[in-house]
Amino acid sequence: MFRKIDYNSLSVQEATVLQKELKEEVIIAPYKGPIQYIAGTDISFDPFSTHVFAGIIILSFPDLQPVAYSLVKKEVHFPYVPGYLAFREVPALLDAWDQLKIIPDVTVVDGHGIAHPRRMGIAAHFGVQVDKPALGCAKKKLYGIYEEPTNEAGNYTILSDKQGAPIGSVLRTKTNVKPVFVSPGHRMDITDSRELIEKCITKYRLPEPTRLAHNIVNQFRVGTLQEGYSEM
């Protein structure tokens, strides 16, 4: 059961307090157990619109074949504020999660986990809300210090906060291609998160769960796919 939060009525100051409360519920620990299904999430929105398009896709693991997806369009009123995007995105993802008939063992969120100024990126926020293992894989750095990994695929460096504490990994998924930023969100650790993303890379820079989630959300936004849950 999700923690009941009226996201639309929150001020930024109240959201900061809530992030601190949710942070106390984040568990960063080695993942235990097999993975049969892995999910990817994506969100599409115009910063000046009140409508959010959200999608969750479920893949079998380790073969990464799509088996189901859930799509939701939701109106949100929390303002577009960097560092607080979870408050615009998580409500729609929770609605999409609520439609699922196959519950994934791990969810890969398009965004950051604890690699966030307050350790509460969208993957941490979402993971705590559903209380399931989650990690973030982002295309750009939001917060932290790192050295560039060497150009060969599979190389990585550690992403640290300003005090030097590790908060994620900077992973080169393809040779001579920009790295991705991987961080645990909930019920996983830094090593688990990086190693799982490595297993989700095929011929593209981005891991299959979030790449395919991005595809279905775009199809939903243009009307090719319809809102709701569907098995594939």
Image (cartoon, helix red, strand yellow):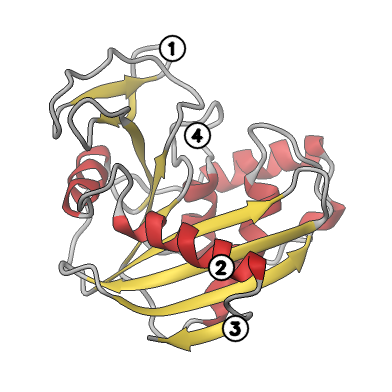
Rounded to the nearest whole Å, what is the CA distance between mark 3 and mark 2?
13 Å
Callout 2 crowding tier (Cα within 10 Å): few <14, some 14–19, many ≥20: few
Amino acid at dot 2: Gln
| Residue closer to the observer: 12 or 96 | 96
Rounded to the nearest whole Å, what is the CA distance between mark 4 and mark 1?
13 Å
Place of residue 161 in the rendered image (x, y in percent of width and height, measured from the top left): 41, 18
Q: Nearer the viewer, mark 3 or mark 4?
A: 3
Rounded to the nearest whole Å, what is the CA distance between mark 2 and mark 4?
32 Å
Name the element at disc 1: loop
Q: Which mark is residue 162?
A: 1
| Mark closest to the chain's N terminus, 3 or 2 | 2
Quadrant holding the C terminus = bottom left
Q: Which mark is residue 219?
A: 2
Rounded to the nearest whole Å, what is the CA distance between mark 3 and mark 4?
32 Å
Q: Judge left or right: residue 110 versus residue 85.
A: left
Rounded to the nearest whole Å, what is the CA distance between mark 3 and mark 1?
42 Å
Q: Which mark is residue 52?
A: none
| Mark closest to the chain's N terminus, 3 or 1 | 1
Q: Which residue is mark 3?
A: 228
Amino acid at dot 3: Gly
Q: Which residue is mark 4?
A: 119
Q: Judge left or right: residue 129 versus residue 19.
A: left
Q: Is residue 80 visible?
A: yes
| Residue closer to the observer: 211 or 105 | 211
Q: Nearer the viewer, mark 3 or mark 1?
A: 3
